[in-house]
Image: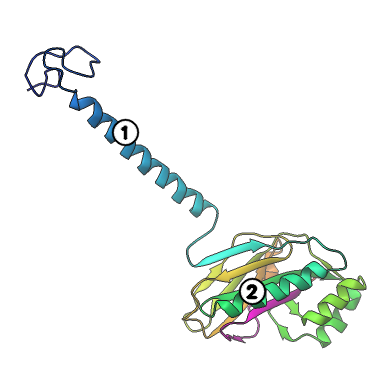
Amino acid sequence: MSSTECSHCGEPLHEGARACGYCGAPVRTRWSMLAITAVLAAVCLAAVAAAILLLGGRSSTQDTAAVDQRGGDFAWLETAMKQCDDQAAKDAKGLHYLVTPLVDEPRDEPGWRRISINDIGNAILIGGEDMLAGLRRKALRISTEEYVFSARNETTKDVLTWKPSTGVRKFVVNDASGIQQFKVQFQSSDAARAINWGSTFERQPGNCYWVNAILRH
């Protein structure tokens, strides 16, 4: 039976008819086509959503979030540090980083190097109190240059790299159960500064890692 005949009585159908003019039966073909169209539309939307996630550099294993920078005298940064600690304590499965990229004066670098708590290859890592004190007396400033933050699992050597960022930012590995030791790294517009990983960190579940990093000159 052709698509131009009623599936109920077999009489010819007028083009575009919603029901048979002889027996009144609804035209099934029309509703089938609408259903197929709806399914195809849903598939297309799903494909677009997946493409947006891929192009945005996001995945189910990694996440990133901006930091609220409202509040004078760097009180907002102290708040962000505390919030990262609180969030990490509630999420022992995840690995939380709060990255603060810093810039100093070249003449001050030897002094910062003397109090560095770790060498991460292409940056000098300093403690939270030293960072806040340096920012408040204007010996340090928060870098405005774009950077790429990466972390490497020292057991598997797998590298997680987040999308390019600027300023203070939170980075999370959502399931870090397989990470016991890790290293971190910054990449910038100067590729020569992105070749070293530096020292190893021991992961302590439930801790937020404050990466207060003076980027090398």
Q: Quadrant of the N terminus?
A: top left
Give the mark nearest the N terminus, 1 or 2.
1
Foreground residue among 117 and 63: 63
At which x and y percent is residue 102? 79, 70
The image's colouring method is: rainbow
Mark 1 → mark 2, Cα distance in angstroms: 45 Å
Asked which secondary structure carries label 2, the reply is strand
Looking at the image, which residue is at 90% across and 72% down? 136
Image height of 19 relative to 136, above or below? above
At which x and y percent is residue 176? 50, 77
Tell me the kind of residue under disc 1: Thr
Evaluate whether residue 80 shows in this view: yes
What residue sits right under mark 2 in the picture?
A: 97
Image height of 211 relative to 116, above or below? above
Image height of 67 relative to 41, above or below? below
From the viewer's perspective, tell me whether residue 153 is left or right of residue 64. Answer: left
Q: Residues within 10 Å of mark 1 (few under 14, many from 20)?
A: few
At which x and y percent is residue 20? 16, 16
Question: As drawn, which residue projects farthest toward the front?
Answer: 24
The answer to if 16 sits in the magenta stretch is: no
The answer to if 208 sits in the magenta stretch is: yes
Foreground residue among 193 and 94: 94
Write down the quadrant of residue 21 in the picture: top left
The span picked out in magenta is 195-216
Looking at the image, which residue is at 83% across and 87% down? 114
Question: As drawn, which residue projects farthest toward the right?
Answer: 137
Foreground residue among 134 and 81: 81
Evaluate whether residue 215 shows in this view: no
From the viewer's perspective, tell me whether residue 196 is left or right of residue 74. Answer: left
What residue sits right under mark 1 in the picture?
A: 37
Mark 1 against mark 2, which lies toward the viewer? 1
From the viewer's perspective, tell me whether residue 3 is left or right of residue 156. Answer: left
